Amino acid sequence: QSILILNGPNLNLLGTRQPEVYGPTTLRDIELICAAKAKALGLDIVFMQTNHEGEMIDLLHGARGTHAGVILNAGAYTHTSIALMDAISSIMLPVIELHLSNIHAREAFRQTSYISKVCIGQICGFGAAGYPLAMQALAEYLGNPA
Ligand code: DQA
């Protein structure tokens, strides 16, 4: 089984982007953490990042038929994008919402997520460690614990 780990806008800058909020870990570091977890779980992963809302939607559409589920850090589009919510509703795949920071403890505008209601669950506040946690949760949801 394969899962898509999709990262949205500005996450390419992790490591130098507000490290006091998002930690020192780069997106490449996170990709390596995910690769190790995938090996332990016996899953294949595709790890991607885009700064473009429409491309995120295209990648979600493309996940159908290719991947068994998706882990999505949608960045700020979480709080703004009805189109992203509709894409998640439309693909009939389990999607886990992921954030490095605890969005519920931040500015009011980050405390609303359009995508929460169409995701199977949310992991936030654990920094880079949230990625392997989300992978574990998705593997168990898919009936593949390891
Ligand atoms: C984020 C939280 C969002 O509010 C923010 O816009 C991001 C990153 C996180 O991982 O904590 O870009 O999704």
Image: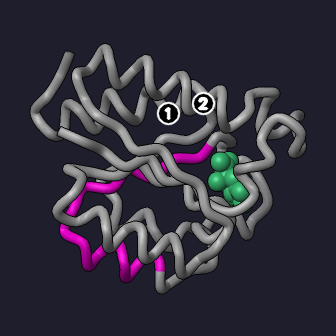
Amino acid on which the number 2 mark rests in the picture: Ile
Which callout, 2 or 1, points at the residue further toward the start of the chain? 2
Q: Are marks 2 and 1 in contact (CB under 8 Å)?
A: yes
Q: Which residue is mark 2?
A: 30
Q: Which quadrant is home to the C terminus? A: top left
Q: Magenta span has 81?
A: no
Instruction: Give the magenta part as a residue range.
Output: 84-99
Q: Is residue 93 magenta?
A: yes
**Element on which disc 1 rests:** helix
Determine the CA span between mark 2 and mark 1: 8 Å
Please report the residue visible at 34 percent of the width from the left and 52 percent of the height from the top.
70
Tell me which amino acid carries mark 1: Tyr
Image disc number at residue 53:
none
Q: Is residue 142 positioned above or below 65 on the image? A: above
Circle 2 Cα neighbour tier, 10 Å, few/some/many (<14 / 14–19 / ≥20): some
> In what quadrant does ligand 1 lie?
bottom right
From the top left corner, tell me how far across and down residue 25 is, in percent: 74, 28
Q: Quadrant of the N terminus?
A: top left
Q: Residue at left 30%, top 44%? A: 3
What x and y, as percent, mark residue 143? Answer: 10, 33
Does residue 132 sit above or below 67 in this rendering?
above
User: Dividing the picture into quarters, in which one does residue 44 lie?
Assistant: top left
Residue corresponding to mark 1: 131
Q: Is residue 145 above or below residue 5?
A: above
